[in-house]
Amino acid sequence: MSPTLRQMRALVAIAKSGSFTLAAETLHVTQSALSGQIKELEQLLGVKVLERNTRRAQLSEIGRELYPLFDKMIQDLDGAMADIANRKALKKGLVRVAAPQMMACTLLPEVMAAYRGAHPEVQVKLVDCPVENVSGRVFSGEVDFGIGPERDPAAEIAAQLLFEMPFVLVFPGGHPLERQERVTWADVERYPLIALEGQFTERLLRDVPLKPYNEVTFMTTALAMVNANLGVTACIPYAAPMVKLYGLRMRPLQEPELTRRFFLYTKSARSLSPAAQSFADFLFQFVSQHEWRTPPSLAL
């Protein structure tokens, strides 16, 4: 058998105070209970840990050897328990989130800023990456969770719907489409379409028979190309801040009105930490209270 935590605390308290009375007060126990803990420890070890031939409680040779070991174990344990309590109370903690580049430079910074206002001691680390890499970051454990568009089911990855938004078309100011009251997918066929490579565009082409003029990895690249009058691009309304930054126009796409669903991805066999769960809950609440709508007359 090994010494109990109470026995170790009893020895350490007596060693620090040099008195049964003070040690008992420190531990909030009676002197008889404290004496009993020391007797049990000595019986367990088969040796004396205290010398009782003086008025002052003194450690024996074995007691002096055990004291620093017990003290360090108690400090390490108390520190670990305090850290857990702080994390549970959201007084500290680290949250790691993976998101596609466009979401990482529009929606997520807004959420992070609002969350920090409520929980300033929790650090949220944003990992921006190509949309196809989000699930991989989650699977490897590099991040607590990821956010991205709908993907084919993957083993050990759980998906929870975050929001669903319609496609919008982005084009330069003065473009012929700006004069139209409504913009349809058939209208897009008349202009070079700059699309994202991978499953995002593959899923789109299942619904509308378009042939992209160019496919790029990041939506910011597509917006820069649109800004250079190289074509038009389709995106989701949450990208509005970046569209505005480029001075472009954004209009809803109709006939048909297509939407894309975005999910929060987690590893199935892994529970979120208190901080990560708190940020995830905050994200869902933030999205539910901030609807991105793009009126037909919007000119960014």
Image (cartoon, rainbow, N blue to C red):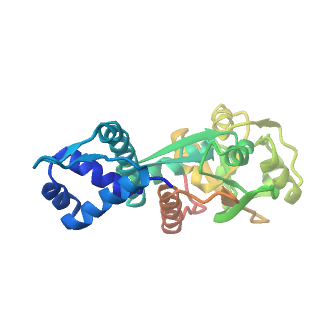
| Res 62 → quadrant | top left
Residue at the location (36% across, 48% down)?
74
Labels in figure, total: 0
Q: Is residue 231 left or right of residue 69?
A: right
Comparing 264 with 30, the one in front is 30
Residue at the location (81% across, 58% down)?
153
Q: Is residue 216 left or right of residue 297?
A: right
Residue at the location (69% across, 39% down)?
130
Question: Does residue 174 show up?
Answer: no
Comparing 284 with 216, the one in front is 284
Where 235 sits versus 293, above or below? above
Q: Position of residue 285 (x, y in %)?
A: 49, 67
Q: Residue furthest left?
A: 55
| Res 60 → quadrant | top left
Q: Is residue 183 left or right of residue 63?
A: right
Residue at the location (58% across, 60% down)?
294
Where 155 sits versus 73, above or below? below
Q: Position of residue 248 (x, y in %)?
A: 58, 43
Q: Position of residue 197 (x, y in %)?
A: 79, 41
Q: Position of residue 175 (x, y in %)?
A: 66, 43
Question: Does residue 99 show up?
Answer: yes
Q: Residue furthest front?
A: 53
Comparing 108 with 96, the one in front is 96
